[in-house]
Amino acid sequence: MDQQKPPFCEGLVSIVTPVYNGEGHLPGMLDSVLAQSWPQIEMILVDDGSTDGTLEVAEGCRGRFEARGYGFRIVKGPHQNASAAISRGLPYVAGEFLIWPDSDDVLAPESVEKRVRFLREHPEYQCVRSLSWYFDGETGARTEQADERRGDLSREELFWDVLEVRTFVCCGCYMLRSEPFFAIYPGRRVPEYDVGQNFQMLLPFLYRHRCPTLREELYGVAVRAGSHSRTALTQAQEEKKYADYERLVDEIAGICGMDSREELDRVTRWKAGRRYRISLKYRRWGEAFRAFGQFLQCGGGMTGKELKELAWVLFHDAWGWRKLYPFYRRLSTWSSSAKSWLASRRRDIGEDEID
């Protein structure tokens, strides 16, 4: 492949979508791209080593994209992960604007146009996002299920809100200007981990640039049983996921050039809080106490969230009751004995019994 970076084409929107074994849901996503009202789009579909009919489905859509006047490219590679797949697609981006929707989600017909027009009318912004709706990935019916908070939609400095899960990170909701994005990643590769491709794409950008919100639902998120984000993990898988996120966020902090003690402490609190929660979940008390100590040392405090998590662990499957009840019984017996002894002593010296 020619590694020479193409110039950015004014008005063109590059859509980079990784897909793995998506023959069942990919047509819906591609149909939503073809239904866009914006006339300048290039579709860069990155196959992450699919073993089903994904490539055949994609090739079957090529003619429709060409007839629509849209660019269409399929990039193939071995199965790795979503962030590696995105990295394989980024060298081909030629558009002034960039989005990266998931392969099972959909774009509203004016999703691209409304965001492009906003950025054209507001050159002071380098990115914009919209709201999303959720739908059943099998039936297509709208659902109220949502995994992410919308948060304070008036806020524009979103780095910490995204990292600390105070707002949503639905990938297809965000549109970035390509030039400042590739100023962050001049090699046109993002950090490649088994987790968090949206963190790689968004966090370094949001650290540098404000991001306003269009209060319209312009992106549909599929809720699908058995999807990667909703599959139950084993303990080993979950612990690896947590460790990968820690390494990723450390790398992102380096990309951002964080050097203030306040910001570095905040990143440490984020990592310690996550370590505290997973240690509680798997009852590794020593690790939980060490993580909580680090959390406090970096300026954190015990919030309602931490208290609820601790209570859940203590009383999940009656574990806490089995451990604490014998102590409670001993304490109650001692208290009753102490009261009886005190009452008898007071009677001996002629004082009234005091409860």
Image: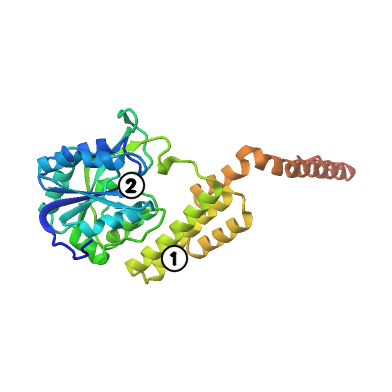
Find numbered disc 2 in the image and state the secondary structure of the residue it sits on: loop
Crowding at label 1, few (<14), some or many (≥20) Cα neighbours within 10 Å? Answer: some
The quadrant in which residue 317 appears is top right
Q: Is tag 2's residue or tag 1's residue first in the polypeptide sequence?
A: 2
Nearer the camera: disc 2 or disc 1 = 2
Q: Which mark is residue 117?
A: none
Outermost residue, bottom direction?
259
Where is residue 250 drawn, in percent x and y? 41, 64
Residue 69 visible in image? yes
Residue pointed to by mark 2: 168
Q: Which of 242 and 162 is in front in this view?
A: 242
Q: Which residue is drawn at 50% across and 44% down?
A: 233
Answer whether residue 161 is visible to the viewer in this image.
no
Q: Are marks 2 and 1 in contact (CB under 8 Å)?
A: no
Q: Observer-nearest residue: 331 or 9?
A: 9
Give the left or right position of residue 299, taking residue 347 as reference: left
Using residue 212 as the reference point, say whether residue 191 is left or right of it: right
Q: Which amino acid does label 2 sit on?
A: Phe
Image position, residue 77 (x, y; %): 32, 53
Please say if 93 is above or below 333: below
Residue type at tag 1: Asp
Which quadrant, please, contains the N terminus? bottom left
- C-alpha separation, residue under disc 2 versus residue under disc 1: 23 Å
- The colour scheme used to paint the residues is rainbow
Q: Name the residue under label 1.
A: 265
